[in-house]
Image (cartoon, rainbow, N blue to C red):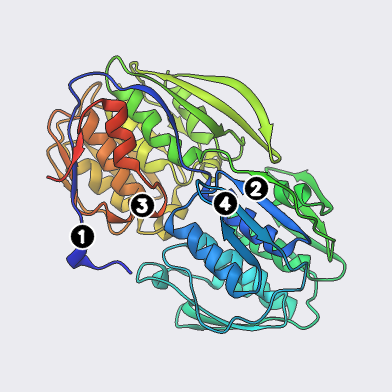
Amino acid sequence: MHDSAAARPLAARAPSRPLSGEALVPGDKSISHRALMFGALAVGTTDITGLLEGEDVLRTAAAMRALGAEVADLGGGHWRVAGRGIGGLVEPADVLDMGNSGTAARLLCGLLAGHPVFAVMTGDASLRKRPMKRVTEPLGATGARFATRAGGRLPLAVEGATDPLPLDYRVPVPSAQVKSACLLAGLCARGITRIVEPEATRDHTENMLRHFGATVAVAPEGHGRVIELTGQPELVAAPVVVPGDPSSAAFPAVAALLVPGSEILLRGVGMNPLRAGLFATLAEMGADIARLDERTEGGEPVADLRIRAGALRAVDVPPERAPSMIDEYPILAVAAACATGTTRMRGLKELRVKESDRLAATAALLRANGVTVAIEGDDLIVEGQGGPPPGGGLVTTHMDHRIAMSALVLGLASRKPVTADDAAFIETSFPGFAALMNRLAGEEALAAP
């Protein structure tokens, strides 16, 4: 649990030389969660390599163990899961604590809805503020029953359906978590579960369902898609190589673009087009990012990224790109602060319900460091400095790891050091972030203030 008394401030300053070298970023968090869950639902033993061993994913591993799967940590990101088959999960003996992970909590609602078990789920102070109604409402149509605190918040109790009904649901706002929760519930239901999404969102669940042997049909409809899952498939254990998380790769990538003269190589980064919106946007800004050795691993496209520093120019980011880069707006805002011209990022309503009100927190991060920024409706407008921003600010992170890392990248590119008021929880999603950045810098550019 996060405790303000244990806050660990961290400051970043411009390094004395360019960033250089190569690095592996942590495994993709979304895929890591799903690999553990599908391993638990499959028949046989699933080998997972490159698993992200951050706090969020370890909570999912503990939950799968509590639900009866055998989950073994073999060291170095190599894990093995002996599954129980569809419908085979058992009732947990204790409360499931999902820590800070909204993904784990929402996907687990779907998993539990389809099993005839009673379970209670909680999380840390931040997760207990986040709304769960967006998943519990549609999942109620399976026959599962949910009880939550006011506003649909954790702690939450679920009584799964004995004979779950398939869902036919149109997701009201683009959300991979809601879609995935509904598909997970549909695994245990007889018949076809049909999900319509208004805009295409990350499709790791569909890719992994196919990888484990389920029948999933996807058809375009307008900007969105119709997904049909045939219920009660036999999921068969399959090895999963977890690619590097593009959301994590964003931080060293943007740092290398902004610190003059830098050139780095990030190996094995997931390049799923529904996740790579940031890299498309940076390319429009003139970023020098080359995709090398493009390949497919575990149903996901992967590449090595070579990134070279250079001048960036402002762009207008359309709202339909938001689902493919929803977690990357804070770091994009840092890139925009150093670019030439005014960048407008449109349609960021979803950022208001992340770990923090990420829209307000991103604006405050830039303001504290001398960058002019405005919020108009759901748009974020950043006045680029055409070079290093003033810096020198203290950034309030609101227990949000992406705000903390964005602030530190800004510090590497600013005239004066930038301090994040608390960097303790960066470990939940990017273990070893400061050490990796210092290795690329060749010095202690990130250190306690």
Mark 4 = which residue? 32
Give whichever of discs 3 and 1 has the lower sequence position.
Answer: 1
Q: Position of residue 78 (x, y in %)?
A: 57, 48
Marks 4 and 3, the one that precedes in the sequence = 4
Q: CA distance from mark 3 to mark 1?
A: 13 Å
Residue occupied by mark 1:
7
Tell me the element at label 1.
loop
CA gap, disc 2 and disc 1: 34 Å
| Residue linked to disc 2 | 204
Q: Earlier in the sequence, mark 4 or mark 1?
A: 1
Q: How many marks?
A: 4
On screen, residue 45 versus residue 440, left or right, reads right
Q: Earlier in the sequence, mark 2 or mark 1?
A: 1
Tell me the residue that label 3 is attached to: 427
Q: Residue at x 44, y 54 (%)?
A: 54
Q: CA distance from mark 4 to mark 1?
A: 27 Å
